[in-house]
Amino acid sequence: MTEDVTAIDTTPEPVDGLDEWRTYDEFAAGIDTYRLPSTDLGGTSLVLALDDGQTLSLRFGPSTDSGTGRVEWSGLGAAGTDPYDAVAVRDDVVFLNLPLTSREREALTVVFSTATHRAVVVRSRIAPEAVEGTPQVGQEFWAATTDAGPATGEVPGPSRDLIGKRNVYRYSPHHLYEHVYVSSQRYAWQCLEGVQRGHGDMDLSTVWKFADGLYLFCFREFRIAVASVWLHDLGYQLRTTGIFLGLNGEGASEHSRAGGHIYPLGTVSYPDAQPV
């Protein structure tokens, strides 16, 4: 007697649009759905002393009825009055972003602690022209201290702690991404859900440790003009808060907020030779 066996097709379903690389504004739409709520810094001020001797001064005005606020700032060779967005990622740690309107194609991001008075400053800037093989959005980093009290604890700086980690990030019901941190300079990503589903790449990245379980993670993409700044809380919260700066489909600069939940998948340990 011959057994009747029905073959099961295990071929993955085709994904539409793999040949069409999505623009920054297409994939960023709604990526802040699960972001932590904003916090109001109105009526406060902060002066940051950067590790190269520069200062960055911030004075926050009152929030409007719509909940948005503005900040007068000066430092890094410039000054202006711009909108700001702040998130209390922990009771004593604030993620602050200035999506600059006074300076086109630029953003300032500050992470600071009200307990240790340590800070990190990131400046993201879109270059005037694209250069093949180089991300069009560049980033600069400074460790800093605030004028709110004497600095204590470890100085924030570059970290290798994420190398080998593999996490999934859920930003909304329609945004699910996987990250693999492969070295001190690069990470790999793929979209599991969303308009970029099936797309992935390996891009330049920078990781700084800010405090126990808190890591600043920044990436700069090659294929499209976009960069991002994130603060990963890999402690009990397993949350991430971030921003994007890039060129949209019309070629204009655009700022976006982002945030969501972190789901660790595992960690690889290298037995002998280590990544850069």
Image (cartoon, rainbow, N blue to C red):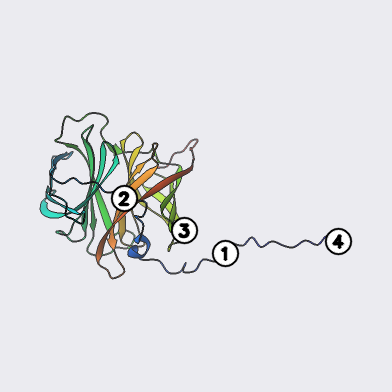
**Disc 3 marks which residue?**
193
Give the mark nearest the N terminus, 2 or 3: 3
| C-alpha distance separating marks 4 and 2 | 60 Å
Residue type indicated by callout 1: Glu
Residue reaching furthest to the front = 65
Percent from the top left, x then y, of residue 26?
36, 65
Tag 2 secondary structure? strand
Residue situated in front as seen by the camera: 99 or 18: 99
Residue type indicated by callout 3: Glu
Tag 3: Cα neighbours inside 10 Å, few (<14), some, or many (≥20)? some
User: Residue 97 — which label?
Assistant: none
Tag 1 secondary structure? loop
Q: Is residue 243 above or below residue 161?
A: below
Give the mark nearest the N terminus, 4 or 1: 4
Say whether residue 240 is left or right of residue 178: left
Tag 2: Cα neighbours inside 10 Å, few (<14), some, or many (≥20)? many
**Disc 1 marks which residue?**
13
**Disc 4 marks which residue?**
2
Quadrant of the image occupied by residue 222: bottom left
Residue reaching furthest to the right = 1
| Residue contact between numbered discs 4 and 3, judged by CB atoms under 8 Å | no
Taking the spot 51% from the left edge, 66% from the top edge, the residue there is 15
| C-alpha distance separating marks 3 and 1 | 14 Å
User: Residue 242 — which label?
Assistant: 2
Tag 4: Cα neighbours inside 10 Å, few (<14), some, or many (≥20)? few
Residue type indicated by callout 2: Gly
| C-alpha distance separating marks 4 and 1 | 31 Å
**Image quadrant for the C terminus?**
top left
